[in-house]
Image (cartoon, coloured by chain):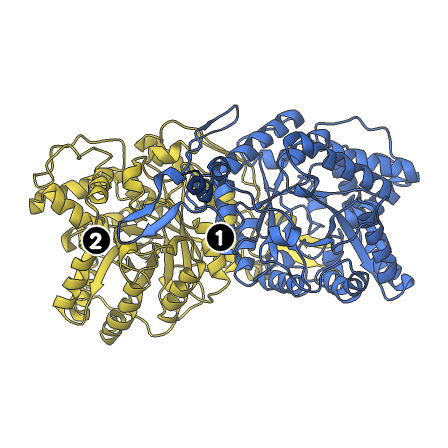
Chain colours: A yellow, B blue
Amino acid sequence: MAQRSGFLSLGAFLYPSGHHIAAWRHPDAKADAGIDFKHYIALAQAAEAAKFDLVFLADGVGTRGDDVEFLSRTAHSYQAQFEPITLLSALAAVTQRIGLVGTVSTSFNEPYHVARKFASLDHISGGRAGWNLVTSSNEHEARNFNRDHHFAHAERYERAAEFADVVTGLWNSWEDDAFLRDKASGRYYEPARRHVLGHKGKHFSVQGPLNVSRTPQGHPVVVQAGSSEAGKELAARTGEAVFTAQQTVEDAVAFYADVKGRLARYGREPDDLKILPGVFPVVGQSESEAKEKFEQLQALIDPVVGLALVSGLTGGFDLSGYPLDGPIPELPETNASKSRQRLMIELARRENLTIRQLYQRVAGARGHWQVIGTPKQIVDQLEERFRQYGADGYNIMSPVLPGGLTDFIALVLPELRRRGLFRAEYEGSTLREHLGLKRPVHPAACARPAASTLAAAA
Amino acid sequence: MAQRSGFLSLGAFLYPSGHHIAAWRHPDAKADAGIDFKHYIALAQAAEAAKFDLVFLADGVGTRGDDVEFLSRTAHSYQAQFEPITLLSALAAVTQRIGLVGTVSTSFNEPYHVARKFASLDHISGGRAGWNLVTSSNEHEARNFNRDHHFAHAERYERAAEFADVVTGLWNSWEDDAFLRDKASGRYYEPARRHVLGHKGKHFSVQGPLNVSRTPQGHPVVVQAGSSEAGKELAARTGEAVFTAQQTVEDAVAFYADVKGRLARYGREPDDLKILPGVFPVVGQSESEAKEKFEQLQALIDPVVGLALVSGLTGGFDLSGYPLDGPIPELPETNASKSRQRLMIELARRENLTIRQLYQRVAGARGHWQVIGTPKQIVDQLEERFRQYGADGYNIMSPVLPGGLTDFIALVLPELRRRGLFRAEYEGSTLREHLGLKRPVHPAACARPAASTLAAAA
């Protein structure tokens, strides 16, 4: 295998008080971080000063669950926090270079609204917007949108694929040079540079054009997060970055090769899509300090919360009737997120975990890869996956915020830079440029001979 | 009639290059203002420095029309500009006191998304968000949302009323003191202070709760813009401010009395709703300078644009077959915005205008009230309507931006202040406080005896 060189990408995955389920109870945490705009300004500006590629926001269009005994004991489950589009737009005004990636589900939205808001954000931010396209697999979200149930897995992905096509089509409503704005002649735009989509599909009928001009990045970066078969195929067809979760380097390398290998059939190059696994780092000056930090958080997990979390991640199956210190029972495959459920169960079987051990394990990184140790130990692992083509970069899921992010910046980044794995300065100004993604050429501009060619032919 | 005292409210209605249809062609205009975030920052900060109550953004969820010969000659019709939620959120980060009011239609949205985004904006801005609730009457918007036609007038308002109920209900998902965030006990919120909406209606089924906590203003200010019978009734039931258009002081006084008179039947006080007509001011140091400024803009109107605009404002009726210098023909009443159509036709009949004169007239303020003259002349008119209870304040529709707004601030505001009609400093910090609107008490808090009452009874 070739020794891989170049820089890896880094995202700062912001979650109110931190990604650890008990983060809000940590002595240093801001418990009301979810509605504290100043908290997010500080995080985004710190990530930008450290030259991160992007900040990343997850989302839920509703509280996840209805077990109030659980919900009233957690700051997770999307109960009281900013909506991503409003938050990213506000952050755009107080940052200059860092990318702004937000999650919006295709299940309970209209493509026109989504295309328009991200296009608007791309203009406001000067080319820093990214849309994390997800599908929703939560009944509680469905009930906020006139439905009793969420869409079944296959239908959800079929809808998502059509949704992505419509959004991309709308983003191509105008060519880059469509707007003449010629005060003398009165021509505001060139009619031939305007393209009406006229989409009529199974799930959507959308006429267009979008009422936002083509954006600084050509269009916002499309990020995806599904790791199921349908999710990987959708990513290969339309994704430009994939946010994923693998526990081992072998799984990471296999996932990487699998997704990159699918690109060619859509006429795409391997570099047209970046793979950015989530990583949950707990860093200390010594290994024992790192472990103590982690144990301090683990001790704050309320058992009611831990048990409910495992239940949610294994497809909604209720584990509360089983002994906490016994093994995970056999679980039926459900209609919920299949890849996440499989990850959980494989983890428990591989390490022979009890329910209590599983909840302690997943409560931390909620199924993502956790690395605990000194800066050197952490960078060894980050470097290994990058060099072996298991990742193009990482989405950093700080256990507690802001402390986990500032620790990562102060302790881990210098070691990454010392090894030549991360840039010291931004090299571009847009999110695409940070990630090394090409700016998409408008389809009509591809088809049309260049002016110089016409001149030469005349 | 009692001589009215107190301050009037002022909104800065931002429209990219200005409200005049030919504004973008003006020598001082920024023709690409619609996607220039710095332009909007400068406008919002200028309005804030002048102590305006709010900035106001209109909206269209799609280009209005499909006549490309017309559309390609105008910067109006919502073809290439920021989406309001993203723009207001970004402006929230670079302003401190001014209110942020954005238009979102109830026709092609889901109430959960709308409630959530405005609640989030209210938190981000520290209590400065306002939602201008409108219904959509444009076929071209409908076609972007899986429909061939927009909703008929009655159905549109029925849907809007239910939509408003759902949004308000979602905003009451949490009581002010619901979130305990008690690190020691692990209680994140008090379950009894959480309220699940469980709405099942004709147009919407929305379970709730909203996943944003109760906002600084209790809930964002609800603004409305309909002047039809159904629109006035909806405003009386749920509106806290009304943006309207009357040509004469008599009509303004009648509208004011009509809407305020409807409040009692919903258990509301006259001061619970503010009436803010739009006004299109052209100010000069002398009357002749003001008129010259106006004529300079009028001369820039392309006849193709003027004619199409009149057609749009009279319900889509095509006037292009009629002589430009002849009278307005009899027009059938359409399903489109009735109040706007009636205003246009009454104006033409009253002043015996030709089609050309009508398009010149409405092209300026697009059916709104235009005042042209010296600061004294303009303030005489603003004062008259305010003192006679025809308005609680005004939404200022600057002909060209930024020049029209900075002129208003430099020339008109000092005269308003000299007469004691406008504040010199902000007196509160939220939009509600600026407008003199009460902060809504949560319904459950109303129903529950206060702790002190319980203590006294014990």
Mark 2 residue crowding within 10 angstroms, few (<14) / some (14–19) / many (20+): some
Q: Quadrant of the N terminus of chain B?
A: top right
Q: Is residue B81 visible?
A: no
Please state the horizontal and vertical placement of residue A127, each as a whole percent of the image: 48, 60
Q: Nearer the viewer, residue A313 or A74?
A: A74
Q: Position of residue B114 (x, y in %)?
A: 51, 41
- Compared with A338, B73 (above or below) is below
* Quadrant of res B283: bottom right
With B314 as the anchor, is A179 left or right in this view? left
Residue shown at the point (61%, 53%) measured from the top left:
B433
The answer to which quarter of the image holds residue A384 is bottom left
Label 2 residue SS: loop
Which chain hosts label 2? A
> What residue type is disc 1 on?
His
Where does the image place residue A337, in percent across and percent down from the top left? 27, 38
Would residue B254 be visible to someone looking at this image? yes
Q: Nearer the viewer, residue B225 or A160?
A: B225
